[in-house]
């Protein structure tokens, strides 16, 4: 269960990152990036809620804590993008997506 939430987080984060890169290259229609970032923010928030509510034994507790930290960082990066800080958002997304990918590889 936790692993599928991490996969969802990676997917949402990558979608936001790809959208930012396409927009930076001038390849997005006006308003599309705003919609994409809003959707990904909602998806990431829903994943955070899932992680918070998921039952976890002792072995899963550390994994869940690490996933929550990375998920919150990913959400913060998307919020940076929503406020127009594209470069910082891409940099943060790279960092947190690497963390999430590392967690995915652990399982």
Image (spheres, helix red, strand yellow):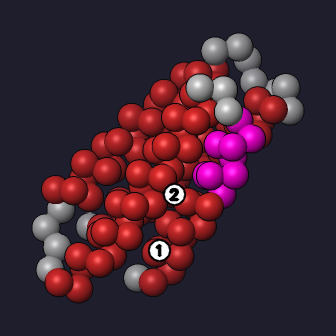
Query: Is 59 or 18 nearer to us in this picture?
Result: 59
Name the residue beneath numbered marker 2. 10
Query: Is 73 or 57 nearer to us in this picture?
Result: 73
Residue at the extreme top of the image, as rendered: 30
**Residue contact at pointers 1 and 2, CB within 8 angstroms:** yes
In this rendering, does residue 93 appear at all?
yes
The percent position of residue 44, horizontal first and vertical second, equals: 41, 45
Query: Is 65 or 18 nearer to us in this picture?
Result: 65
Relative side of 101 to 4, left or right:
right
Q: Which residues are magenta?
A: 86-94
**Residue 85 higher or lower than 51, as above or below:** above
Location of the C terminus by quadrant is: bottom left
Tell me which residue sits at (30%, 69%) in the image.
64
Mark 2: give few (<14), some (14-19) or many (20+) Cα within 10 Å.
many
Q: Secondary structure at mark 1?
A: helix
Name the residue beneath numbered marker 1. 104
Tell me which residue sits at (55%, 60%) in the image.
96
Marked residue nearer the N-terminal end (1 or 2): 2
Whether residue 92 is in magenta: the answer is yes
Location of the N terminus by quadrant is: bottom left
Residue at the extreme right of the image, as rendered: 25
On residue 80, which mark appears? Answer: none
């Amino acid at each position: 269960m936790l692993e599928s939430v991490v996969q969802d987080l990676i997917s949402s984060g990558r979608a936001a990152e790809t959208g930012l890169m396409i927009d930076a290259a001038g390849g997005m229609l006006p308003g599309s990036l705003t919609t994409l970032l809003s959707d990904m923010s909602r998806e990431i928030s829903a994943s955070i809620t899932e992680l918070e509510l998921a039952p976890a034994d002792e072995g899963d507790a550390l994994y869940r804590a690490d996933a929550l930290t990375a998920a919150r960082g990913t959400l913060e990066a998307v919020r940076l993008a929503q406020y127009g800080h594209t470069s910082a958002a891409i940099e943060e997304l790279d960092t947190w997506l690497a963390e999430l990918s590392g967690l995915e590889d652990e399982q």
